[in-house]
Image: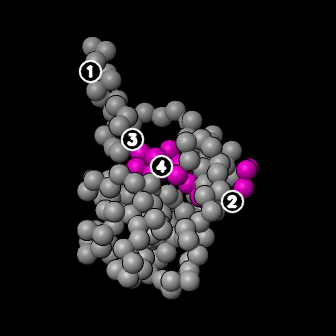
C-alpha cells in the first residue's frame, strides 16, 4: 500500500486482509471485527485496524488504544464520519498513526490533518503530488484542533 506520510511516499508493505486467519499476510490492515479476533487470539498489535463509518468504536476502545495503526475508510465523498472518528480517537488519547483510506482529494487533506490524520493512502505519484499541494495550502482556522494551529482570534489578540 502506497502512503503519503511526512511528505514522503512510501510502500509500507501492508495489504488489506479479508479475515483474521493466522495465515493472513502480515503486516496487514484488518477490518475491526477481524482485528479484534486476531488480537484476542495472539495479542498482536503490529497489524493495523481498518474502521469505517459503520463501526462502533466505543466497546473496542480499550483494545484500539494499543493499535500501531488505525486506518479510517472514507467511502462516499459526502460522508464526513471519518473526520469525526479521527477527532474522537485523538481526544481519547490515541497517539498512533491515523491513516485516511479511500477517495481523498486535494481539498480534503488539510482538514484531515486538522482532525489528526498523519498518513494518507495514495494511488500513485500524481495523486501524492496532488495531496502534497493540498497540505501546503494556507488557510485560517477558527477553532483549535488536533493539528495544534493557532485560531485566528488568538492571532489577532496577540497582535493587538
Q: Is residue 21 left or right of residue 141?
A: right
Q: Position of residue 40 (x, y in %)?
A: 34, 80
* Mark in the foreground, 4 or 3: 4
Name which residue lies at 31% across and 15% down: 159
- The answer, for residue 73, to whether it is visible in the render is yes
Tell me, yes or no, whether the two marked residues, 2 and 1, touch with CB atoms within 8 Å.
Answer: no
Q: Residues within 10 Å of mark 2 (few under 14, many from 20)?
A: some
Whole-angstrom CA distance, mark 2 to mark 1, is 42 Å
Relative to 22, does residue 112 appear above or below in the rendering? above
Q: Is residue 104 left or right of residue 40?
A: right
Question: Which one is earlier in the sequence, the residue at label 3 or at label 2?
Answer: 2
Instruction: Find residue 118 and name its label.
Output: 4
Relative to 89, does residue 25 appear above or below in the rendering? below
Question: Which one is earlier in the sequence, the residue at label 4 or at label 1?
Answer: 4
Question: Which one is earlier in the sequence, the residue at label 2 or at label 1?
Answer: 2
Front in this rendered view, residue 149 or 68: 68
* Helix, strand or loop under label 2: loop
Amino acid at each position: 500500500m502506497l502512503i503519503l506520510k511526512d511528505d514522503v511516499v512510501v510502500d509500507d508493505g501492508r495489504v488489506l486482509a479479508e479475515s483474521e486467519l493466522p495465515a493472513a499476510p502480515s503486516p496487514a490492515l484488518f477490518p475491526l471485527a477481524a482485528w479484534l479476533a486476531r488480537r484476542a487470539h495472539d495479542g498482536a498489535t503490529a497489524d493495523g485496524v481498518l474502521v469505517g463509518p459503520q463501526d462502533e468504536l466505543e466497546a473496542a476502545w480499550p483494545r484500539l488504544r494499543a493499535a500501531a495503526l488505525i486506518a479510517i475508510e472514507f467511502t462516499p465523498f459526502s460522508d464526513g464520519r471519518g473526520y469525526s472518528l479521527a477527532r474522537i480517537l485523538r481526544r481519547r488519547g490515541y497517539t498512533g498513526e491515523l491513516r485516511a483510506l479511500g477517495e481523498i482529494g486535494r481539498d480534503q487533506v488539510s482538514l484531515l490533518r486538522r482532525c489528526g490524520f498523519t498518513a494518507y493512502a495514495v494511488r500513485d505519484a500524481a495523486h501524492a503530488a496532488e495531496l502534497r499541494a493540498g497540505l501546503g495550502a494556507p488557510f485560517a482556522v477558527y477553532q483549535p484542533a488536533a493539528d495544534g494551529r493557532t485560531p485566528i482570534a488568538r492571532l489577532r489578540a496577540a497582535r493587538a
